[in-house]
Image (spheres, rainbow, N blue to C red):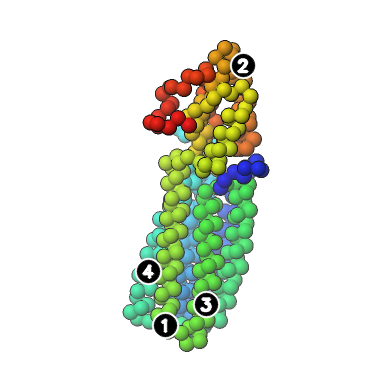
């Protein structure tokens, strides 16, 4: 989640935990009701929705565990803390979601070859309606929590549950169509469409996970905010080699600032501390490393990107 440019906020990891607990409760209810609906109706569309909820339970448990682990304080072996466990969790979620989509494709082809009549349409419609209400409520809780705790694990979970609303609405349409004489092949065709949606979602979640694990730079808007804070601070004559990456719910910021060459060490140190405090106002939970150089001295071993010095 991006830090709002005009509204600095404090991060409270407890909200990520609340969202994690809520997802476990909701998915348990959904699995129970969809299982009843599937055995009663025999619909592969209902099966696709049930499969999605079973996957939700796996990824939600993984997400909750990763949030717990990511909040562990830094120790002797992990001096940057454990925040990147959220990236590992999101990568795992993406693999599970992709695997579920593959299972649905296999099931759909089986149904194309051996169509199964759909029964108990109204029961399935009722269960899907309940699923939409619960999933929408959960997404609202998760998105609200992301404003207080920008957890990648919760963000990935929210993206998945958000797709549930679309999937369940589609299942209702399929059940209504088959109840009114639509051909049986429309049921497995929708299942394949769900599998494609899951694959797209898995790619998106996996991309975010890899970005965190490989220390991708923050989006331009957030880098620009950092640059504004650093460059406009009184006493800073220049800056270079800014690095800013996401680490769990926080960020890691490393930058070299230039100050007047005739300043005392204590005065230069005070400027660095002031810059650090200003950054923390907009980026709570940031790990900040500031190196001080005399004005005009920009060459050092931290400059690692050929041709890029910002």
Q: Residues within 10 Å of mark 4 (few under 14, many from 20)?
A: many
Residue at position x 43%, y 50% from top? Answer: 207
Q: Which residue is mark 2?
A: 267
* Image coordinates for residue 115, horizontal then vertical, percent: 38, 82
Tag 1–tag 2 contact (CB < 8 Å): no
- Up the image or down, 11 lies above or below 170; here it is above
Answer whether labels 4 and 2 touch (C-beta < 8 Å). no
Q: Residues within 10 Å of mark 2 (few under 14, many from 20)?
A: some
Observer-nearest residue: 116 or 275?
275
Task: Identify the mark nearer the N-term, 4 or 3.
Answer: 4
Give the camera-side residue of 301 and 60: 301
Q: Are marks 4 and 3 in contact (CB under 8 Å)?
A: no
Is disc 2 placed on a helix, strand or loop? Answer: helix
* Dot in front, 1 or 2: 2
Q: CA distance from mark 1 to mark 2?
A: 78 Å
Q: Which mark is residue 173?
A: 3
In the picture of the structure, the residue carrying the numbered disc 4 is 105
- Marks 4 and 1 in Cβ contact (< 8 Å): no
How far apart in space, not on screen, are marks 2 and 3 (Cα)?
Answer: 69 Å
First-in-chain label (1 vs 2)? 1
Specify which label sits upstream in the sequence, 4 or 1.
Answer: 4
Front position among marks 4 and 2? 2
Give coordinates of residue 245: x percent, y percent: 49, 38
Residue 235's disc is none
Residue 76 appears anywhere in the view? no
């Amino acid at each position: 989640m991006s830090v709002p440019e005009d509204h600095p906020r404090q991060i409270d990891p407890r909200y990520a935990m609340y969202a994690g607990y809520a997802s476990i409760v909701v998915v348990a209810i959904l699995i129970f009701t969809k299982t009843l609906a599937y055995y009663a109706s025999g619909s592969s569309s209902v099966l696709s929705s049930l499969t999605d909820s079973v996957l939700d339970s796996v990824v939600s448990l993984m997400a909750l565990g990763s949030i717990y682990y990511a909040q562990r304080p830094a120790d002797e072996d992990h001096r940057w803390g454990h925040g990147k466990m959220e990236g590992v969790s999101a990568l795992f979620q993406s693999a599970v979601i992709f695997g579920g989509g593959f299972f649905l494709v296999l099931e759909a082809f089986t149904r194309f070859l051996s169509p199964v009549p759909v029964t108990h349409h109204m029961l399935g419609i009722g269960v899907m309606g309940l699923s939409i209400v619960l999933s929408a409520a959960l997404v609202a809780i998760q998105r609200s929590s992301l404003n207080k705790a920008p957890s990648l694990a919760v963000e990935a979970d929210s993206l998945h549950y958000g797709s549930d609303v679309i999937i369940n609405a589609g299942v209702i349409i399929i059940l209504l169509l088959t109840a009114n004489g639509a051909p049986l092949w429309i049921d497995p065709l929708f299942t394949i469409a769900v599998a494609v949606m899951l694959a797209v979602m898995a790619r998106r979640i996996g991309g975010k996970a890899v970005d965190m694990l490989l220390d991708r730079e923050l989006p331009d808007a957030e880098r620009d905010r950092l640059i504004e804070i650093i460059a406009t601070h009184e006493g800073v004559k220049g800056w270079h080699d800014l690095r800013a990456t996401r680490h769990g719910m926080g960020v890691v910021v490393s930058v070299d600032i230039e100050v007047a060459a005739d300043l005392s060490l204590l005065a230069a140190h005070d400027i660095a501390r002031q810059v650090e405090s200003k950054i923390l106002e907009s980026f709570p939970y940031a790990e900040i490393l500031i190196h001080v150089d005399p004005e005009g001295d920009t060459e050092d071993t931290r400059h690692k990107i050929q041709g890029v010095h910002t």
